[in-house]
Image: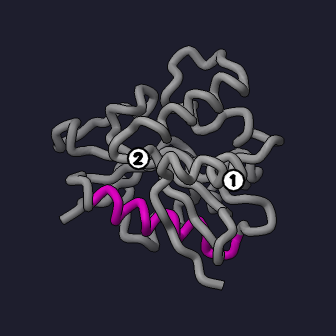
């Protein structure tokens, strides 16, 4: 099966909803953790916020992965200014820093290359929209075993394979970045 990655545009909302599902952490959070500084909204409010972002943000708030015509994954990517809980630091002007904050891969499709395809799509998407640096905070699963629920920010080895370098580390949570040409 071929994995393709497409922008999460308003006409793809049903596919976004299918990837997030109705149970588990993705259905509850709807990728609002790095956006909602209050952290006390419920499942429906989070889902509505994501819907509003898909409907109105330019560039789009994320990308969808498909195996054939089946939506199987999501990655949240955008200018770091969209993510108050993901503070940029360093030598690059804030408006040039983009962030990958969340992955969602549907059960049954994990470990099949979906996250890798999404990350490559995010790199291309960020580059196409003028990002100078793409950052993320993946988990280093070699340092500490994590449950699937704890891997929503991605896995370090996936980022390293895509050319990202380690900038900072706090135990098993790592800040990585990729300078975009």
Spot occupied by residue 120 in the image (x, y as percentages of width and height): 43, 68
Q: Looking at the picture, tell me which residue is in the foreground, 179 or 67.
A: 67
Q: How is the image coloured?
A: one colour
What's the magenta region?
A: 111-127
- In the rendered structure, the answer to whether residue 132 lies left or right of residue 116 reads left
Could you tell me what secondary structure mostly forms the magenta stretch?
Answer: helix
At x 20% / y 53%, what residue is drawn?
130
Quarter in which the C terminus is drawn: bottom left
The residue most toward the right is 23
Spot occupied by residue 49 in the image (x, y as percentages of width and height): 56, 28
Q: Can residue 45 be seen in this view?
A: yes
The residue most toward the bottom is 1
At x 68% / y 46%, what residue is drawn?
17
**Residue designated by label 1:** 19
Q: Does the magenta stretch include residue 2?
A: no
**Residue designated by label 2:** 60
Q: Distance between the residues labelled 1 and 2?
A: 16 Å
Res 92 → quadrant = top left
Label 1 sits on a secondary structure element that is: helix
Spot occupied by residue 38 in the image (x, y as percentages of width and height): 56, 14
At x 49% / y 45%, what residue is drawn?
101
Mark 1 Cα-neighbour bin, 10 Å: few <14, some 14–19, many ≥20? many
In primary-sequence order, the first of circles 1 and 2 is 1
Res 57 → quadrant = top left
Q: Can residue 139 be seen in this view?
A: no
Q: Does the magenta stretch include residue 112?
A: yes
Q: How many labels does the image show?
A: 2
- In the rendered structure, the answer to whether residue 108 lies left or right of residue 50 reads right
Q: Looking at the picture, tell me which residue is in the foreground, 144 or 59.
A: 59
Spot occupied by residue 131 in the image (x, y as percentages of width and height): 24, 52
Label 2 sits on a secondary structure element that is: loop
């Amino acid at each position: 099966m071929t994995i393709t990655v497409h922008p999460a545009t308003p006409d793809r909302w049903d596919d976004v909803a299918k990837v997030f599902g109705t149970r588990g952490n993705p259905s509850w959070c709807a990728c609002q953790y790095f956006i909602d500084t209050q952290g006390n909204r419920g499942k429906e409010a989070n889902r509505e916020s994501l819907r509003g972002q898909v409907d109105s943000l330019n560039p789009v708030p994320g990308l969808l992965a498909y195996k054939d015509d089946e939506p199987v994954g999501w990655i949240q990517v955008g200018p770091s200014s969209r993510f108050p809980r993901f503070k940029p630091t360093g030598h690059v002007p804030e408006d040039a820093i983009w962030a990958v904050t969340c992955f969602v891969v549907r059960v049954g499709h994990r470990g099949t290359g979906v996250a890798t395809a999404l990350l490559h799509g995010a790199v291309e998407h960020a580059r196409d929209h003028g990002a100078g640096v793409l950052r993320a905070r993946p988990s280093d699963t070699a340092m500490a075993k994590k449950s699937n629920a704890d891997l929503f920010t991605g896995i370090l080895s996936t980022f390293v394979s895509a050319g990202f370098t380690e900038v900072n580390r706090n135990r098993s949570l790592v800040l990585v970045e990729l300078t975009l040409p």
